[in-house]
C-alpha cells in the first residue's frame, strides 16, 4: 500500500512538474524591445536648399524639363532642408561611387548607433546571442553582419542573419526573424541593425521615375535591442503583440512597381513606377484584413460587420447608392475605428502621399499622423529605419504611456506591406529620452509650417523658356 502511494505520489509530482515546465517555457517566448538608438549623422552631411540646387546642377544629364519636374517633386515631398546625405555627395563624387563609399557610410552608422546602445544599457557585445542586419541596396563580402561582429568582437556562436534587397519594410522582417527564434530559444538577447546605403545608389541620369528617389531617400539607421530574458523584461520598453507580413511578389504589376534597374544609358537607379500607389493600396488592404481581428475589440468588429451588412442591403435596394463618385486613385476609408484598439500610429515615411493616404484610410487626425509627417520633414525617408524615427518622436514628445499600443505600418519593394503592434510595458515619460535622436530639436516640433523653401528659392525655373534657358551663376 505504501509502495503504491509512493508510486502515485511520484507520478503526480512528475505530472505537475511537466505542467509547470510547459507554462514556464511559454513565458520566455515573448519578444520585448529593451532599447533602441536612431542614428543622427554629423551636421556636415546636412542637405540645405542651396546645396540641393548645387547637386542638381552638377548632373549634366538634366535640362530645364527635369529641373521643373524635380522642383515640383521636392516642394510637394514633405521633406525639409535638415535631412542628411552620404559624404560622397558633398565631395561631388556621386557619379563615381565605389564599394568602399557604401561600406564607410554603413560603418559610420553602426559604430555610432550600436556603440551608444550597448554602452547606455551596459551590455557587452559578447552578450549578444542573435544579430540581424538589414541593408537592402548594399551587398559586400564579408557581409555587413560580419563587419559588425569583427568590429565589436562578438562571440563565435552568435546566430547571424544578413538581409539584402528587402526594401523599406525590412526592419519588421528582421524583428519577425528574432521573434521566431525566441519561440525556440529562451533567455536570449538580440541586436537588429537596420539602415540603407545610399552612396552607390545615387542616380545621376535623367529618367524621372528614377530621379524621384534622390528627392525622397536620406541617410539614417537604427540599432534595436530585443530580448526574451526574464532578468531584463522589467527594463523593457515594448512588447510585441502581433505581426502580419503581406507579400504581393507573385503579381507582376506589384513586383515591377518598385525596382532597382538600369536606365537606357546603363546608369543604375531605383525605379518608382506610376502604379506604385495602386500596388501599395492593394497590399495595405490585404494586410489590414489579417491584422484587424488581432488588434481590435470584438465590439468594434461586430459594429463594423453590422454596418457593412446594412450598407449591402441598401445597395441591393438602390444600386445607385453603391457608387462613390470619387476621383480614380482616391484611397478609400477602412470604415472601422482603429482607435478602439490602438493609441498611436507609426507610419512609414515613404512620402507625403503615403502618410496622407494611410491617414485617410484609417480615418486618422493630424495628431495621429504628426509623428510621421515631422519625421519625413526632419530626416526624410530613411528606408527601413524610418519607423524607429517616428517612434522616437512619440517618445520624445512623452506620448507613450504604460498599456498604450503602437501600430507600425511599413511598405517595401517586392511588393510588401508589413505591420505589427507593440504594447508599451512601462511609462516612457520620465528620463527615457536620454539617447533620443530628437532631443536636440523636439522643442521646435511641430513648427507652424512645414513648407520647405525650395519653391521660394528656385521657383523662377517655372517661368523659363527651354530655348533661352541658362543656369545663372548663383545656381552654380
Image (cartoon, helix red, strand yellow):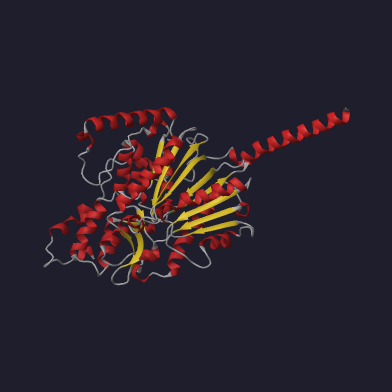
> Where is residue 62 shown, x and y percent of the image?
23, 66
- In this view, the residue in front, 28 or 78, is 28
- Residue at 33% in and 42% down: 358
Specify whether residue 119 is in view.
Answer: no
- Residue at 80% in and 31% down: 8
- Residue at 20% in and 52% down: 456
Q: Please give left or right for residue 79 compared with residue 34 in the image.
A: left
> Where is residue 55 shown, x and y percent of the image?
29, 63
- In this view, the residue in front, 472 or 384, is 384
Furthest toward the front, the residue is 316
- Residue at 16% in and 67% down: 470
> Where is residue 451 shown, x and y percent of the image?
25, 47
- In this view, the residue in front, 263 or 371, is 263
Where is the C terminus found, in terms of image quarters? bottom left
Q: Quadrant of residue 42?
A: bottom left
Count of all numbered marks drawn on residues in the image: 0
As displayed, is residue 51 above or below residue 437? Answer: below
Q: Please give left or right for residue 456 compared with residue 84 in the image.
A: left
> Where is residue 337 shown, x and y percent of the image?
36, 32
Specify whether residue 379 is in view.
Answer: yes
As displayed, is residue 421 above or below residue 151? Answer: above
- In this view, the residue in front, 14 or 453, is 14
Q: Quadrant of residue 303?
A: top left
Furthest toward the right, the residue is 2
Q: Please give left or right for residue 168 compared with residue 191 in the image.
A: left
Where is the N terminus found, in terms of image quarters? top right
Amino acid at each position: 500500500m505504501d509502495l503504491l502511494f509512493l508510486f502515485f505520489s511520484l507520478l503526480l509530482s512528475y505530472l505537475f512538474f511537466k505542467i509547470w515546465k510547459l507554462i514556464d517555457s511559454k513565458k520566455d517566448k515573448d519578444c520585448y524591445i529593451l532599447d533602441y538608438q536612431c542614428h543622427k549623422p554629423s551636421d556636415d552631411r546636412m542637405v540645405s536648399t542651396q546645396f540641393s540646387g548645387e547637386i542638381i546642377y552638377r548632373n549634366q544629364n538634366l535640362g530645364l524639363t527635369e529641373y521643373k519636374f524635380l522642383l515640383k517633386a521636392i516642394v510637394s515631398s514633405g521633406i525639409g532642408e535638415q535631412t542628411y546625405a552620404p559624404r560622397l555627395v558633398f565631395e561631388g563624387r556621386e557619379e563615381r561611387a565605389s564599394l568602399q563609399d557604401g561600406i564607410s557610410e554603413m560603418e559610420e552608422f553602426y559604430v555610432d548607433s550600436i556603440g551608444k546602445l550597448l554602452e547606455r544599457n551596459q551590455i557587452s557585445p559578447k552578450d549578444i546571442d542573435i544579430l540581424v542586419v538589414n541593408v537592402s541596396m548594399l551587398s559586400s563580402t564579408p557581409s555587413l553582419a560580419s563587419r559588425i561582429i569583427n568590429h565589436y568582437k562578438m562571440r563565435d556562436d552568435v546566430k547571424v542573419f544578413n538581409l539584402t534587397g528587402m526594401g523599406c519594410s525590412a526592419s519588421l522582417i528582421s524583428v519577425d526573424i528574432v521573434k521566431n527564434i525566441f519561440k525556440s530559444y529562451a533567455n536570449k538577447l538580440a541586436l537588429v541593425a537596420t539602415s540603407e546605403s545610399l552612396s552607390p545608389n545615387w542616380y545621376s541620369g535623367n529618367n524621372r521615375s528614377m530621379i524621384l528617389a534622390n528627392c525622397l531617400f536620406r541617410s539614417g539607421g537604427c540599432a534595436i535591442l530585443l530580448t526574451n530574458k526574464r532578468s531584463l523584461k522589467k527594463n523593457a520598453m515594448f512588447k510585441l503583440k502581433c505581426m502580419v507580413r503581406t507579400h504581393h511578389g507573385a503579381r507582376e504589376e506589384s513586383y515591377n512597381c518598385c525596382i532597382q534597374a538600369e536606365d537606357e544609358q546603363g546608369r543604375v537607379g531605383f525605379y518608382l513606377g506610376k502604379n506604385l500607389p495602386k500596388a501599395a493600396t492593394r497590399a495595405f488592404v490585404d494586410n489590414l484584413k489579417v491584422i484587424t481581428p488581432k488588434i481590435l475589440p470584438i465590439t468594434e468588429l461586430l459594429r463594423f460587420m453590422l454596418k457593412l451588412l446594412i450598407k449591402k442591403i441598401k445597395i441591393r435596394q438602390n444600386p445607385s447608392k453603391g457608387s462613390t463618385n470619387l476621383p480614380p486613385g482616391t484611397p478609400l476609408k477602412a470604415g472601422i475605428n482603429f482607435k478602439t484598439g490602438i493609441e498611436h500610429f507609426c507610419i512609414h515615411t515613404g512620402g507625403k502621399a503615403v502618410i496622407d493616404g494611410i491617414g485617410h484610410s484609417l480615418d486618422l487626425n493630424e495628431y495621429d499622423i504628426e509623428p510621421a509627417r515631422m519625421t519625413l520633414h526632419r530626416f526624410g525617408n530613411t528606408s527601413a529605419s524610418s519607423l524607429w524615427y517616428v517612434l522616437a518622436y512619440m517618445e520624445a514628445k512623452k506620448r507613450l504611456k504604460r498599456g498604450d499600443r503602437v501600430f507600425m505600418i511599413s511598405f517595401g519593394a517586392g511588393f510588401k506591406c508589413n505591420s505589427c503592434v507593440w504594447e508599451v510595458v512601462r511609462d516612457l515619460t520620465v528620463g527615457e529620452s536620454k539617447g533620443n535622436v530628437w532631443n536636440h530639436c523636439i522643442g521646435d516640433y511641430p513648427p507652424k509650417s512645414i513648407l520647405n523653401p525650395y519653391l521660394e528659392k528656385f521657383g523662377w525655373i517655372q517661368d523659363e523658356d527651354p530655348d533661352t534657358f541658362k543656369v545663372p551663376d548663383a545656381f552654380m
